[in-house]
Amino acid sequence: MRVASGAGGQRPPTLTIVASGNGASALPVGMRLLRRGGNALDAVEACARIVEADPTDTSVGRGGKPNVLGIVELDASIVDGTTHRVGAVAALVGYLYPITIARAVMERTPHVMLVGAGAARFAREIGAAKAQNLTASTRELWVERLRKAHETPASVRRRARLLPVVRKTVREERGTVNFLAIDGAGHIASAVTTSGWAYKYPGRVGDSPIVGAGNYCDTRYGAAACTGFGELAIRNVTAKTAVDRLAKGIAPVEVARLAVADANVLDDAAFNIVVLAADGTHASATNREGRRYCFMTADMEEPVTTAREVVR
Ligand code: GLY
């Protein structure tokens, strides 16, 4: 596959990592890795692991908000934009680094995605790091949300019918972190990891592990990843559509706007996208005020966090 080498094929690729706003603290680690000649796949995985292990981010990994039964179910995917190898896990319980398990699915199995008990079994088989992902504070938040729905942990676990409770427990809480990177050889990779929609129905899978929906990249054209209401990214196949638009020569800023406009046609729920073109240009759009994304290039000492363009 042809690898981008900057405008006109003359300049070396600009080392770049772009992420959702909650990924900013991880960018220096990813950039250090790229500066030392590391590849994009290693960089996005390293960045994702930092947020997965951070208990203060309640939308990802350890400390992520649980499903309605108080179980933290994690989704993640990783894409190699040069080989189009992909790996994903969904509804994974009890492990610290879902992104690394997704990468192992990609590199060590004949499959692209493992879910639920099978994903956990595989994680155990490869000796992945275990974790109790429900922290004291996210447990407290869960109990409080149940209380507002006139339930308790014991009552909800006894229920035969969860749907009426889920209708009361779910609100607009669907954070996620994503990382898109270009390395020194011009290769592009992308990683997305999340605890999904807070207080969801058990087994609900969002867009983050669905390659083409919440995560996609192609080294020839660029990368895109979504946060927000994942069901919309699945219905619109948003990330693949965005990369297809980059392939047609549409600028990242317009690609990002179009993706949010597509989501707005389906629903008025929160939706965000980050887009990175193979030449290092990037953009982000959202349909909510105050949402941010971040980026870092080789010449920067620190990441910059900036506003996403709002598309109504
Ligand atoms: N975008 C994350 C989710 O919907 O699960």
Image (cartoon, rainbow, N blue to C red):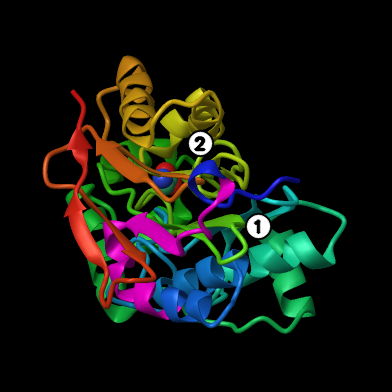
Amino acid type, mark 2: Ala
Seen in the image, is 90 located left or right of residue 214?
A: right
Q: Position of residue 51 (x, y in %)?
A: 39, 72
Amino acid type, mark 1: Gly
Residue at the location (24% across, 71% down)?
Answer: 140
Which is more toward the observer, 14 or 253? Answer: 14
Task: Examine the image and state in which quarter residue 17 appears.
Answer: bottom left
Seen in the image, is 310 located left or right of residue 276?
A: left
Let me know if residue 298 is in the magenta part: no
Q: Residues within 10 Å of mark 1 (few under 14, many from 20)?
A: some
In the rendered structure, find residue 116 and report the number of the disc placed on it: 1
Q: Position of residue 97 (x, y in %)?
A: 55, 74
Identify residue for label 2. Answer: 239
Which is more toward the observer, 178 or 18? Answer: 18
- Which comes sooner in the sequence, label 1 or label 2? 1
Which is more toward the observer, 158 or 275? Answer: 275
Let me know if residue 26 is in the magenta part: yes
